[in-house]
Each structure stands twice: as structure tokens, then as C-alpha cells.
Amino acid sequence: MNQRNIYLVYQKEIQGAIRDRRTLISMIIIPLVFYPLLFLGIGYFSVMGQRNIEKLPSLINIFGGEKAPQLVEILQKDENIIIKQSDPKQSEKQYSKNDLLEEDIHLTIFIPEIFEEEYSGKGKITQLSIVLQFDSTEQRSQLAKKRVSALIDYYRQEIVQDRLEQWNLDKNFIQPIKEEWVDIAPEDKKIGSMLGMILPYLIIILVFIGAMHSAIDITAGEKERGTLATLLVSQLSRLEIVLGKYFTVVTISAISLLLGLIGLGIAFLTPAYLLGEVSAIEVHFSFSLFFFFFLILLPLVGLASAILILIGIFARNSREASTYVTPVYMMAIFLGMISLSQGIELPKPLFFVPVLNNSFVFKQLLMGTIDWLHISGTLISNIAIALLALFVATKVFHKENVLFRS
Amino acid sequence: MRRLCLVIKVSHLKKVFCDKKRGKIKAVNDVDFHCFGGQIFGLLGPNGAGKTTTLRILATIMKPTEGEVLVNGYDVVKEAHQVRQSIGFLSGETGLYDRFTPRETILFFGRINGLSEHIIKARMKEIFQILDMNSFQDIRVDKLSTGMKQKLSIARAIIHNPPVLIFDEPTVGLDLITARVVVNYIREFKSQGKCIILSTHQMVEAEKLCDEIAIIHKGRILAQGTLTELQQQFPEKDLEEIFFHLVKDKIGEEV
């Protein structure tokens, strides 16, 4: 193995990649422009959607409202609530599900029992039974639930207050214990936990996108264009060719990762309202943290590049390679999703599963934890699998039925 | 008279492919031949005769199933690297990089063949002059005509000045003028003492160019010799007639 030859192949591939507009798109435009815009867009639209809905009034129906005039009065006073119908005759009919959907009503209140007005009397203490219908899949119905529930709560407190006064009791009579919860998590850890859910996932996808095009182009694409045999009859060894190509993909993927991190950094630094709740608390990306992210993800870049090179060498042409890459890509997304759903802890054996471990170390880092054991475990497993993939790629490169099948 | 030295020696070469549908295919079946320096050796045969497979084995990009192949004294299996140093290989599958210019292409292939920068520069100047490539040396390959590309492919194959040239159908797809240019260069290489082995299915080309011809069909060499020798062996005087005579016999045998 001659390092100069690896470098010559590397230099040639990089030069070729730079002259390929598609590489530039996947390496620069996607991570630096498209990705942050997408991220901002998601935040913007979810916040805007939420806001628009909150401006709209809730339409409700009340049946049997005459039995609780005070409650109806409270509801009527709220400007966000419009009572469409309050038909005393229908109270007996009981509720049917269609009431909600057909009449564009977000919530229906049934007051089926006689509510005794003498609730304040010293003798009998009664309870008002109310049935409320809503549709949990409709955002406006959920909002109506939130609003009405708050008003009922207010009404309930008034009644309790009155009763306590009537009975001459202190407020503490019904509240013997008061709890006060204090969140001692440091601010950056809180942010880290929130970002940690989604960010690793986004970055991991980016690593694969960055490597995918160039890996396929310089392996299967080269077979397709018929330039591979030219390389094979030169004095380069198969290993030198594989490594030269591998380092090219690593470089391109690393650049796209770096730009992706910068892009997302820019997205996070934009005014908070654009991102909604994610960055409601200001995020402070320090340069060292940023650099650490990059270092932690480099082994993943190495791993993804090796696997993609292997697939590209094995495939007959670019189209076949794209087909083979799809399950690998989906696997990465799947592992990313697991990391999204898991908390911030990962059982030890899982620390050797690539993608999953990268994403967890990333999460830990976001929360300000540096666990060298986890970092080294991640590093070792990524490097080991990458080396294995490169070894297999070199072996595959020796097989003439793989090189000359068409 | 120049003393001829043995450069390529092929003995009992066999290549078997395993195909899922067709089973075992003997692409090359017990082929023997040898060529000398300063000689053009032609493999003549129809498509699928085994020409390309034989040349691929000579170029070390395929391994023989059986037999021994020596190129410039080196074994193609055990000393593949030395063989690759000794050969310039040109075929339909040795494409060029579209995104590079001829100058960059030659620089790259010169470097990976271990040449120093000043030797590459000198060789490039010389080759570009001979092949008349100076006018398009800085134009990207994807903008070049087929003829220009073929010239560049030849330049690429000979940059390291190898003693052996392996050309698989070097004039296929070229217009008459470019084909003639290519043929002239092959003659020129011969005069430099190189050993040239080429495959073709064009009788005229073989007749005009080759010092020795092997007629190959279905993986076997049916006849071999100089044109004069072949003419003596068979009643026909024309290579095309000799070829059809042989192939017809073969078909007759199979029936």
C-alpha cells in the first residue's frame, strides 16, 4: 500500500466531485440552506398554526343549562366561547355522538341531574354531575375543552369558597398540604434534553445524505461510465483505490456535517418565536461545544462512508446502488427514531449499536455531560464496523463477477 | 534484422464462467499463443468468441481458471502488479473521466503509474504532438468527439511507455479517418519495438495490420499463423474466406 497512490486517487475524486453540481447540492446547499430553512419552517408553521387556532372562538352547546344558570353565566361572559344552543327540552334526550360533528360544535355540555341551588345551605351538600363531550382528534375541540375546563374550575372554586364561608372554615381545611416543586436541572440541561430529542436525529440523516451521492457516484457510477477498468489496469492496488475513494466520501460527508451544524446553529440563533417552544429559552452554542459535536459525529461519518462505499462497489450501477442504500438509510432513520423515543439513558450493550450510540453521546453532550466511557465505546464500535465494511469492500473489489456483471 | 523476443506467452488458457441460467460457460477453452516484441498479434473472431476475456486476463483484470499467462516475463496471477507496469490496456470499458481535461487525465495516469512530474510533462508533450492533441488538451472530456476521446485513451494507455500494448477492438465505433489515424499509430508503436496484441472482428483490419493472426471462435483457436501461412494452409486466399471456411467447419462439427 502506497500512501501517495491513495492520495492521488483521493485528489482525483475530490476534484471530480467539486466539478459535479450534484455533489455541491448535496454537500453544501442541503445542509447549509435547505436544512435550516426546513427546520425554521417546521417551527414557524407549528407556532403559527397554534396561534391561529387560539384566536378562534369555541362553539359549544349546552343541554339542561337552566339547572345551572350560574355556570351558564360564567361561560357566557367568556368572549372566546359562543353558546350556540341551549335547549332545555333536549336535556332528556341524552347525548349522541353526532351532535358534535354535524353541527360544527366543538364541545357539548349536558347537565343531566337536578342541581340543587341550596348548595350553600348547612344541611345537604350535593354534587353537580356534568357530562362534557369533545373530540380529542380535533384541535379546536381540544381548545374548547381547555377553556371550558378552566371556567368550570373557576366555578368550582367559587362554590367551595362559599361553602367554606358558610361553614366558617379556613381555606386550609380542604388544603392540608401544599406542595412546591422546584426544578433544579441547569438551564442548559433543560435545553439539551429538548434539543436532544430531535437534533441527533436530524444530524444523523444529514451525515447519510451528505455521503450518499458521492459514495455512489464514485463507485457504482464509475462502473456505469466505464472508467473503473481504466483504474484497475493501472498500477494502483485495489486497497489503494478503495481507500482513496473512502477518504473522498469521508471528506464530503464531514463537510456536509460541518455545514449542517452551522446551518442548524444559525436556525437556532434566529428569534425564538420562529422556532416555537424548542428555543423559547435562548440557546448558547459555544465554539468548543460545536467542535465537540463535530468530533463525536466523525466516527459516524467514517462508518456511513464505509458502508456506502461497500454498497456502491457491490452494485452494478447507480440505480441499483440507490436501491440497496434505501434499507440502510431507513435503518439509520429507525435507529435515530429509537433514540428519539428513548429518554436520555441507554443500556450499556446498546452503546455498541452505531447510530444509536452516536445519537446518545450527542444527547449527553447537549446536556453538558462528557462520559468518556460512552464516547470511547461509540468510537470503538463505529471504527470497528467501518474497518469491517472497508475490508469487505476491498474483497468485493477483487471479485470479477462483481466488477464485470452487467 | 531485428531479433524478436518473446513477450507474451499464453499456454492452455481456460476461463469458465458460472451463469445461473446457462450453467458453466467456457469462454476461453485451451488457448495457446505467443507474441514477440515488434510484432502485432491479432485475435480475430465474432462477438462472444472469447477475445475480450482473453485480453482481460492478459490485462490482469480477470483471473484464468486454468493455464499460464506470462506478460513481459511476469505471471498475470502471481505478479499482477509487474504485469500492469508492463502493459497499456485499451478497450471499450476503459472509459475516460468526463469531468477532466486530457491534460489532467494524462497527469493523473502518469502519476499513478509512478512517473515523476518532469517525465510526465516530457512524455505528454511528445504524445500530444504525435497524436495531434494540442488543440484540445484543455477541453473537458465530455465536450470531446469520439475520435478525440480515442486519441486520449491511446495517450492514457501509453503514457508510461509500456513494452506491451493490449488493444481490444481499437477502431470500433470510429469514423474512417480516425480509424486510419489509430491504425497508423499502432504501426508506429510496432516500429518502436512494442509488442501489440489486438482483437478485432474486422477482417480487413486484421489483414492489413497484423503480423500474426489467431482465428478464435467459441473460446477455441481454430487457426493461427501469418497471413501467408494461413493462405498456404487453406484453399482460400482471402482472410474473410478462410474465416468462414473455419467457422463453417466448426458449425458442421457441432451439428
Image (cartoon, coloured by chain):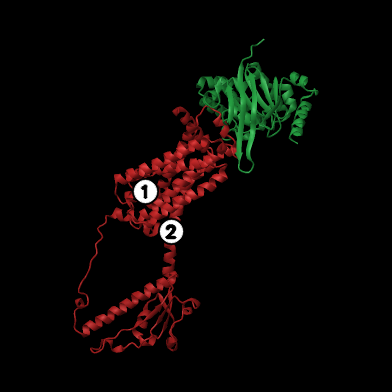
Quarter of the figure with residue B97: top right
Query: Who is closer to the viewer here, A208 or B169?
Result: B169
Residue at 35%, 88% in the rendered image: A114
Give left or right: position of B43 versus A151.
right
Q: Is residue A396 above or below residue A186?
A: above
Let me know if residue B146 appears in the view.
yes
Question: Judging from the image, what is the letter of the chain drawn in red?
Answer: A
Camera-side residue: A244 or A384? A384
Q: Are marks 1 and 2 on the same chain?
A: yes
In the image, which is nearer the foreground, mark 1 or mark 2? 1
Q: Quadrant of the N terminus of chain A?
A: top left
Q: Amino acid at mark 1?
A: Asn
In the figure, what tint was chain B given? green
What kind of element bears circle 1?
helix
Residue wearing tag 1: A357
* Percent position of residue B16, x then y: 61, 34
Looking at the rendering, which quadrant does residue B74 occupy?
top right
* Spatial separation of the CA atoms under disc 1 and disc 2: 31 Å
Q: Residue at x 29, y 44 (%)?
A: A372
Image quadrant holding the C terminus of chain A, namely top right
Tell me if A43 is positioned left or right of B56 in this view.
Answer: left
Image position, residue B53 (x, y; %): 62, 31
Residue A152, position as x, y percentages in the image: 33, 78
Three-letter amino acid code at the position of disc 2? Tyr
Vertical comparison of B81 with A157: above or below? above
Q: Which residue corresponds to mark 2?
A: A44
Quick check: B75 above or below A301?
above
Q: State whether residue B135 appears in this view.
A: no
